[in-house]
Amino acid sequence: MRKKYFDFIIHGGDYNPDQWIRTKEIWDEDIRLMKLAGINSATVGIFSWGILEPEEGVFCFDWLDEIMEKFRKNGIAAILATPSGARPAWMALKYPEVLRVNENGIHNEYGDRHNHCLTSPVYREKVRTINRALAERYANHPALKMWHVSNEYSGECHCELCQTAFREWLKKEYNNDLNLLNDKWWTGFWSHQITDWSQISSPKDRGENHFSALKLAWRRFVTDSHISFFENEISPLRQITPDIPFTTNLMGLYGGIDYQKLASHLDIVSWDNYPDWCTGDNLYTAAQTAFVHDAFRSMKQGQPFFMMESTPSVVNQRPVNKLPPPGMQTLTALQAVSHGADSVQYFQWRSSRAGHEKYHGAVVDHRGHENTRVFREIARTGNLLSGLSQVTGTLCNSKVAIIYDWENARATEYFSGFNNKRRDYAGECVRWYMPFYKRGISVDVIAMDADYSKYDIVIAPFLYMLKPGTEERISTYVKNGGMFLSTYLLGMADRDDRCFTGGFPAGELKTVFGIEHEETDVLPEDAPGKANFNGVTYPVEHVCDIIRSTGAAVRGTYITDFYSGTPAVTENSYGKGSAVYVAFRSSDVLADDVCAYIINKTGVMPDTDIEYSGIEVRRRGDFIFCLNFTQENKTVKLKSSYTDIISGKTLSGDINIEKCGFLILKG
Ligand code: GLA
Ligand code: ZN
């Protein structure tokens, strides 16, 4: 795996010159403006299949040749897209199988984007053909620096081709053994015995939608369908342009595809980042965004990621599309870089004149010139990024990991029982991320089957499902000296959502944690309970396990309800390490206090000596980023001397950072 592909931070975004084919003079103006904005790269052709192949087998590359040539002459790195995200009308009409069938069995008509069957041999062949043609045409073009494969893979198809593929996939998954499948899926429940593979079809409301094992299997199949669709897409690229890296842009914590699995197929992991600034607490939005950056960085350990999209100003798809205040765009960019992004890219370079996204923010808006607030801010960002090239390829050395696992995320949604509302697995993970975020301690966000050995602390909120091997992985980690913290409903079910027998948490984990789970209570929202930890009282919100200590030290107990006096927080020594169990959901305050306790115990240090004051502080390489996402002026206390890379001045003591402002320090 290469650590980095570029020696500078890629600054660019989606560029659609083909929409302006009738007024081509605008293309030169685009190049002039790109230079002015410090743009060094552009992503072209994302949804261009209609113009690239106007008739079956007839390719039209003239416009793209011209654009690529302009990029070459002007030192702009071309990120060339494969166009499979949307298809030409002729194809859909001639080969209806390329279109999706929805879960109600309705065959979609031509239209929209991301509306293709993942299995269709015709579509896969058409994709290979256009991708081969693109790769052959531009393989030796000096502007070509990277591939952007398709766009935001998502959704699923329920057509007969996909149903057959699903059954074939199941045969492989369950060793061609229906008996095994019936056992793992516990099909004796509600007369679900399966006597022939053909009896299985995708989950849907008008059929089977209360069958978590089937739903989990379908999700895995959909992930694998995307992976095989992707591998099909890139087969000509791998062959013809083996030195050009490729990515596909992912969508935050989108649950339809297991990104932690897909990531291993990508050269570069990238995602599209659209924080909803100024509609709630910006500090929380910043922490949530930081969490997702860390998740993408952690997917390919040892390698930075790309922020493939972000908005230069506003989005158009939310019920309320609030304009982020001046400065927020630069902060969004710097935050990505500080967490390990080697790119800052936008959707989109220029506003389209019409179409669904014409009111989405763009670097160049409908006025078409550079004298705009947004353009000036992008140019400022470009200028800053050009001074940060040194960070490319560098990473954060995290001593703490939080497990956010894509498969567990689905499992926690699909089962019925306990708290059927507000499961909010992601929210719980962010809650336990926050104490580290605030202290400037770098965190990796990993899957449950990642390597824990390099971390001093591993936190697993609501780790309900255990993949094979996870129990041993946790045991070994703690035995070897690790600090493992878990919260309620740990280790209840296997990957087919079949409960573990013999008590929870599963198997050896009972010994690792020194506890046994007995029951789980769920409290109405307006009637929280209470528990204490190290002598302080905290609310018990929503869900709590009633547990018994079989050896763990009790650090806190419930003080309400019939289980008052029973353990609520425990800590157990196992081998050389410790396992902490927080049996209930509570406020951020409890998470903060428990984390302070384990941070103190393990001696994990923040990445800088700058204390939290409502400003995000991150170190990447030699740079320290202090980012003020709030709408108030704030002060950072610099205990040592640093160089402000913008003014070149030496700074120490109390430094004011204005709202939406930042400091980039060296030292
Ligand atoms: C996504 C898509 C883009 C565009 C933006 C708008 O990220 O990839 O094509 O639709 O959203 O925010
Ligand atoms: Zn299909």
Image (spheres, rainbow, N blue to C red):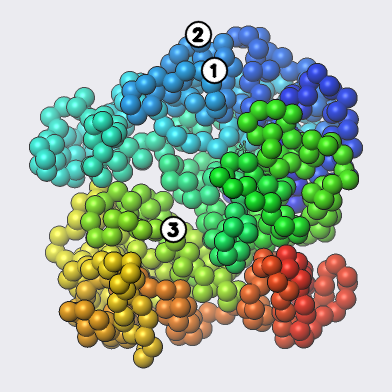
Q: Amino acid at mark 2?
A: Lys
Which quadrant of the structure image shows residue 197? top left
Q: Are marks 2 and 1 in contact (CB under 8 Å)?
A: no
Residue identified by numbered label 3: 426
Q: Residues within 10 Å of mark 3 (few under 14, many from 20)?
A: some
Q: Amino acid at mark 3?
A: Ala
Task: Judge whether residue 334 can be spotted in this image.
Answer: no
618 vs 54: above or below: below
Q: Is residue 21 left or right of residue 294?
A: right
Q: Are marks 3 and 1 in contact (CB under 8 Å)?
A: no
Please tell me which of labels 2 and 1 falls first in the chain: 2
For the residues labelled 3 and 2, the Cα–Cα distance comes to 43 Å
Q: Decide which of 179, 489 is in the foreground and name it.
A: 489
Q: Is residue 321 left or right of residue 579?
A: right
Please tell me which of labels 3 and 1 falls first in the chain: 1
Report x, y in % for residue 495: 28, 50
Element under disc 2: helix
Mark 2 CB lies closer than 8 A to ligand 2:
no
Element under disc 3: helix
* Residue visible at 49% across and 50% down in the picture: 253
* Residue visible at 58% across and 41% down in the picture: 317
Q: Amino acid at mark 1?
A: Lys
* Residue visible at 69% across and 37% down in the picture: 359
Report x, y in % for residue 351: 74, 35
Q: Residue 126, which numbered label?
A: 1
Report x, y in % for residue 121: 44, 18
Q: Residue 94, which numbered label?
A: 2
